[in-house]
Every structure is written in structure tokens, then in C-alpha cells.
Amino acid sequence: MKKLIFCLIILFGCLGQAYPQKVIGLPATPAPEGIAWGGPERQYTSPAINAEVVANVSQPSLAVYLPDASVANGTALVIAPGGGFHFLSINNEGIDVAKWCVENGIAAFVLRYRLVPTGADGVMEFFQKVGQRKKMDEEMAPFIALAKADGLAAIEYVRSHAADFGVQPDRIGIMGFSAGGTVAGAAAFEYTSPANRPDFAAPIYPALHVVDTSKMPEKPMPLFVAVTGDDFFGFQALCTALYNQWNEARQPIELHIYEQGGHGFGMRKQGLPSDQWIEAFRAWLDSHGWLGN
């Protein structure tokens, strides 16, 4: 009996780590003129990528994961999963990152930003369009604008409620993967006020071609960037350009281009060089003092 109780404690303890303490609805601004989502937000396991995803998001939200007070260091990270603006890779690029944050004393906020309206399977709808990238980007433009706005709203919300979450208002960053990297990159370049400016940003294999990178922001922040040399979307070239832009302006940036790992590696362990990115990110955070109290 004692062994059974111990196993149940371990089981529910592990399950508990996967669930947020709170889910917060963000204001859906700007209003999506002429856009309708024909159904509710959906969370399901996609057979195409063998992963749990979220699709058809019409109302942005933040899932809050807070570290124990004994290890909390006052740093916060908004996390934007990727999925081509058609779905969110909610575990590999969201919840699993949040769990890592909590273990390292960081308050994590997984963002569900607004997506392209989709039917039963947003993943398959994305794959059907991906061969016509230019046309797809044009069709997605209104939704990309909404996703960018949701990223800024998330930063502003966390900062305005910093005391409630036990974080410091000058230690709030944003990380995003692929399409979520667009959200993170846009926050770095296109923030509109001190309230929604991130203190640091980490675009991971980001889709920066839909971000206005034509000029440096007024107050650049430290950046951490990771991508692979075999990223089949070619985002390594965008990451290199971002590094050169920041570096030439003598602003702090760290870039990791791993030889192998493909696109969408996230927190998955593949036995490839890209597996090391999260520890590199940890070292980078530590070098800036964001892991200390």
C-alpha cells in the first residue's frame, strides 16, 4: 500500500507540472475586422506530426506556470509556440519549455495567440498550403498582425501584473519558435511602448521574413537566437542577417547555428547537435544575471 501511495504521489506530481496554475484571457485587440472563426478553439493530437496541437485560436490567452518561491529568481518568459500560424505545437514548443523554466526559477507564460481559422485539422491545412509560400504569407498577413499584437499584449500584461506573479518588471523576456519566432522577433523590433518592450528576446528558428527588420529599434535588447544548418525553410539565413544587424550596431546578441536538427526541434531530444540549445540558452541567461535573485 505504501508503495502504491508513493507511486500515485509521483504520478500526480508529474501530471501537476504539466498544468498551469492559471489561464488568463487577453484582450483580442485590435479587433479582427471581417474575420470569423467557424468553431471553437481545438486541442488534439495530430497524426501528421504525432504531436498534440492547438488550432483555431480566436481569443488569445496566457497559461501561467510559476516556480516555487524557494527557487524563483524574478525573471519571466512569455513563450510563443510555432505552427505556421495554423496551429500551435503546444507541448514541444510551449508547455515543455514552461516546465524547464519553472525548474530554473523562471515564471513562464505560454501564449496562445490568434491563428488562421481552420477546420478539423489545422496541421493538414497548413501542409496543403506550404508549397505556395508567397501566396500563403499574403493570405496570412491579417492573422500575423493579430499574432504580433497578442505577443505585445502578453508582455504588457505580465509587466503590469509583475508583483502578482513575483517577477521583476525589468526582467521580462519573450521566446518564440518558427511562427512564434515571428511573434518574438516582432516584439523586439516593433514594440510600441515601454510597457510592451521585452527586456530580452529569444527567436528560435524564427520566420523573420514577415517582421519589419528594416531598422534597429530605438532601444535594442539582448537577443538569443538558435537555428540549424539544415532548417528546410531556410531560416538560418534570416538568423544570420539578424545577428549581423545587431552585431554591427554593437548590441548584445548570441547566435547558435547547429549543424543538424532540422526545423521544429523545440524541446525534443533527437540525439543531434540541436539538443544542446536549451543549455546554451540557460548559460546565456546566467551570463546576463537573469537566473540570479
Image (spheres, rainbow, N blue to C red):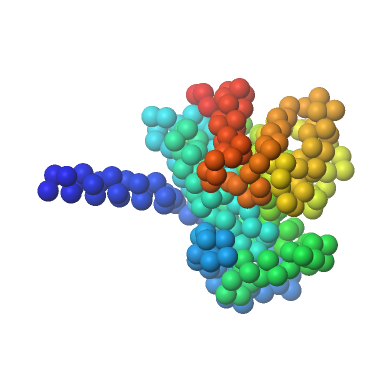
Q: Can residue 176 be seen from the camera position used here? A: no
Percent coordinates x, y for residue 94 in the rendering: 54, 49
Q: Residue at x 73, y 30 (%)?
A: 253
So how many labels did they put on this image?
0
- Image spot of residue 53 (x, y percent): 54, 61
Is 44 above or below relative to 152? below
Tell which residue pokes out farthest to the left in this image. 1
Q: Looking at this rendering, what residue extends furthest in the bottom direction?
A: 38
Q: Is residue 291 above or below residue 88?
A: above
Q: Nearer the viewer, residue 86 or 30?
A: 86
Question: Which of the 4 image quadrants contains residue 187?
Answer: top right
Between 129 and 19, which is closer to the camera in this rendering? 129
Vertical relation: 267 (above or below) 89: above
Question: In x, y percent, where is residue 142?
Answer: 76, 63
Residue beneath the point at 60% across and 32% down: 281
Residue at left offset 76%, top offset 43%: 236
- Position of 252 compared to 49: left or right? right
Q: Residue at x 80, y 50 (%)?
A: 209
Image coordinates for residue 120, horizontal then vertical, percent: 57, 75
